[in-house]
Image (cartoon, grey):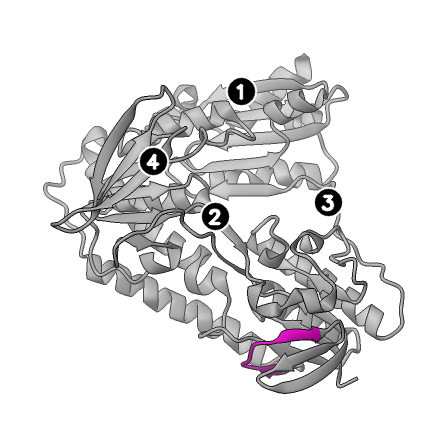
Amino acid sequence: MDYDVVVIGCGSAGSRAAAAAQDAGARVLALDGAEELGGLCILRGCMPTKTLLETAHRLHDIRDAERFGIQVGSVELDFGAHMDRMRQLVARFKRAKVGSIERADYELRRASARFLDPHTLEIEGERVTTKAVVLATGSVVRPFGFECPPGVLLDSDDMFKLTAAPGRALVRGSGAVGLEFAQWLARVGTKVVLSARGRLFHRRDLELGAELEAALAEEMTVRTQSTILAVRPLEAGGVEVDLKLADGSTETHAVDVILNATGRVPNIEPLNIGAANLSPEDLRVGGDMRTPVGHVFVAGDTTGQRQILHEANLEGRIAGRNAAAVALGRDVTTTYDTTTPQVEVVFSDPPVAFLGQTPQELEAAGIPHRVALKRFPEQGRGIVVGARHGFVRLVAGEAGELLGCQMIGPRADDLIHVPTAVVRCGGGIAEMAKIPWYHPTLAEAFIEVARDLDRA
């Protein structure tokens, strides 16, 4: 065999997989055929999105300053400078990421690959054999179901190329990408319609979704439980979009652009996985990141599961170690602890954060639980910072174990790590109730809900 392990894709998951396999003693080839090296998160995902949102949220806060007794007059956004800052920061993050990849000991080639058989790859016309493979090719935008004139249909990648805020936009999709970009557009001057097939967070937490919907409705037209019936070009440019609403009525919106934020799917079409005896369903792997074809492993967005940076990094390390183990004739022993509650965040304003299970999920599963909730508009520091929406909710099991925490409100994206640390350290509701929280803080809300549950 030419290599012990070949890693296809060298973004967040792939670079970690290659390094882990190399550290385990394998001879490793890492491949990346993308136009730029660095991965989705840095180039077109987490970091540029949050950079844009930071400006949009600050712009909103300045315009909201009168509520706090501050007169600021007219405030204008320099859109070009705003985008330049994003590109400069992306370049900085890219340099750090690419530097770490290029300093690694494994072999790196800027090329794509496809399977010829389970152990043979074609790399730019060259046949390469390997004992094990890690697939970490990331994801691509899910196709949109309607034809649109040129320049109208955008995806998340296109948003970073804008030279001006669109006048009118319809955002289709209510995942993190759709919610964050919808609010960014609204705050930089676009008239936004947010359209989604279901209610916000309908699969996990309708109460939290309703709270966020109420906040977003102050800045845009929100049309959850809506279906796109037709998209028609307009002579003057843009399109008309017919929506069917939850009550059966229809309405039409004229927009300049449509943002397709209906999700991402694994980028596997170029891989020819059938030649490796794999199907797309085989890539939804368990804790060892191993497919039914025992020497092929998957990590990151390619699994089609949780598309989150730090989990991609962890999955990459596990896949790399286990691929090296297979290649070197060792037992596969490294697994991902899927029982530990995970964090999810939407960087809207107010931000949304989930840890573990929600009451809705527990009720559906028939698991006994107790719930306590504190609203930020009624909490001391929340009142001071002017919170108009939001709450912190803790969910406990019968023995006082912390099953979940859901938050929407100021700094929820950071505060969610408090209950996360408690769970990770083996604590529960009783421990949270004993923490000497400082007053007045937003985190102080935890003591009220923890005490309510501890007394119950």
Task: State which tag comes first along the sequence, 2 or 3.
Answer: 2
Examine the rendering and report whether any part of residue 387 can be seen. Answer: no
What residue would you read off at disc 3? 338
- Confirm or deny contact between disc 2 and disc 1 (CB under 8 A): no
- In the picture, which quadrant includes the N terminus? bottom right
Mark 4, secondary structure of its residue: strand
The three-letter amino acid code for the residue at tag 3 is Thr
How far apart are the alpha carbons under marks 2 and 1?
Answer: 31 Å
In this view, 103 is above or below 142:
below
Residue contact at pointers 4 and 1, CB within 8 angstroms: no
* Helix, strand or loop for disc 3: loop
Distance CA(mark 3)–CA(mark 1): 27 Å
Q: Could you tell which of marks 4 and 1 lies nearer the N-terminus?
A: 4
Label 2 to label 3: alpha-carbon separation: 23 Å
- The residue identified by callout 1 is 373
- How would you rate the neighbour count of disc 4 (Cα within 10 Å): few for under 14, some for 14-19, many for 20 or more? few
Give the magenta range: 108-116
Q: Quadrant of residue 43?
A: bottom left
Residue 263's label in the rendered image is 2
Q: Amino acid at mark 2?
A: Gly
- Residue under circle 4? 229
Give the mark, 4 or 2, whose residue is nearer the N terminus: 4
Q: Position of residue 194 (x, y in %)?
A: 33, 37
Q: Is residue 71 visible?
A: yes
Q: What kind of element bears circle 2?
A: loop
Q: Is residue 228 above or below residue 302?
A: above
Question: Which comes sooner in the sequence, label 3 or label 1?
Answer: 3
